[in-house]
Amino acid sequence: MRRDTAASSRVTFLKWLIVHNSLLQIIISLRQVEDISNEIVTKPKVTGSNEIVWALKALTLIDLTTLSGDDTRANVQRLCHRAAYPFPLPLLETLVDTTLLKQMHVAAVCVYPARVKDAYETFEQLQCIDDIPIAAVATGFPSGQYGLKTRLEEITYAIDCGAREIDIVINRQLALTKQWEALYDEVCQMRMTCGEKAHMKTILAVGELGSMENVYKAAMVCMMAGADFIKTSTGKETVNATLPVGLVMIWAIREFKRKTNQIVGLKPAGGVRTVREAISWMILVKETLGVESLEPSLFRFGASGLLDDIDKVVRKSLLCK
């Protein structure tokens, strides 16, 4: 009862903050954001053997993703095998200490709700169901243009099939028309539907929000509504993850932590395809949120092709030895 009362009080308080714009006051200069983000990521120089260390770190932060209309059980099985065993064991043994070998897998796999059962059964066969969580996109991905009841049912279905993480997508029209309280209410219901069974990542679809101010405000509203992560994109928009938009989301994360003492994760998705791009993102996070944020519990890459480049970089380094 006390927990319910506390939760109700928190909802009332956060609604008040939204209505009175206490956490949503922000003016952002796009040029300034671009300059600051560029300055942050170009200062450190990552070369040689350090690049391999960063590449392997990026590996452990990937939500390995397939979200295609022609996804089948077979290609989801291949995805899961690669997620669990990204490199042959003999190759890994030349790169990392044997005590770290069990950690050399991706952070999660991400699929449509209809393919969650395929992923779950594959991980059961590989005996790694407890090591690599299954994430499912939901709530009318990628558009979010469905009735709320249907979107909530999709979350429940994915969890029932074995998803431990849900990547919801917000209704962008609510952000574009500045209906922040309505957006908050929707995300709260999605959070309640996830319950304790699944972590919730909230996709902002930044390329469709119209301004950096809207990105900041949408991020703040979603965190107030209970998001465990805020995620840049579905990967289907014209503009997806960029460093300037990542910095704006980081500013929101820091301000939210300052006001509530709660820590929320960040997930860039869409467009991060190379090790160099991944390193830039990791440097951005390290320099703004701290090295402790470079863990799967607080930072992920939503990617399908990044692992290919990690493989290329690692093998090339071994050939040069």
Image (tube, rainbow, N blue to C red):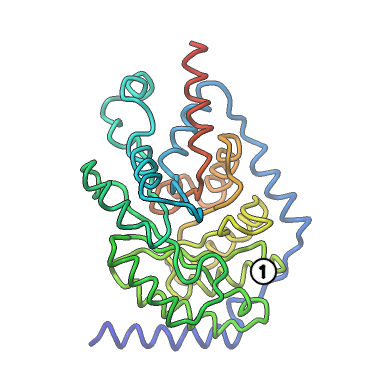
Whole-percent x, y for residue 229 in the image: 46, 61
Q: Is residue 181 left or right of residue 92?
A: right
Q: Residue at x 40, y 77 (%)?
A: 152
- Badge 1 marks a residue whose secondary structure is loop
Whole-percent x, y for residue 118 in the image: 31, 53
Q: Residue at x 58, y 36 (%)?
A: 274
Whole-percent x, y for residue 116 in the image: 34, 57
Crowding at mark 1 (Cα within 10 Å: few <14, some 14-19, many 20+): some
Quarter in which the N terminus is drawn = bottom left
Where on the picture, by quarter, is residue 153?
bottom left
Q: Residue at x 38, y 33 (%)?
A: 86
Work out whether residue 112 or residue 105 is closer to the camera in this orientation and state it. 112
Where on the picture, by quarter, is residue 8?
bottom left
Whole-percent x, y for residue 35 in the image: 75, 49
Q: Is residue 186 left or right of residue 174?
A: left
- Which residue does the numbered mark 1 point to in the structure image? 209
Q: Look at label 1 and name its amino acid.
A: Leu
Count of residue discs: 1
Work out whether residue 152 or residue 313 is closer to the camera in this orientation and state it. 152
The correct choice, above or below, for 224 with respect to 50 in the image is below
Q: Is residue 5 left or right of residue 41?
A: left
Q: Is residue 288 left or right of residue 260?
A: right
The correct choice, above or below, for 276 with respect to 13 in the image is above
The correct choice, above or below, for 174 with respect to 64 in the image is below
Work out whether residue 228 or residue 176 is closer to the camera in this orientation and state it. 176
Q: Residue furthest right?
A: 31
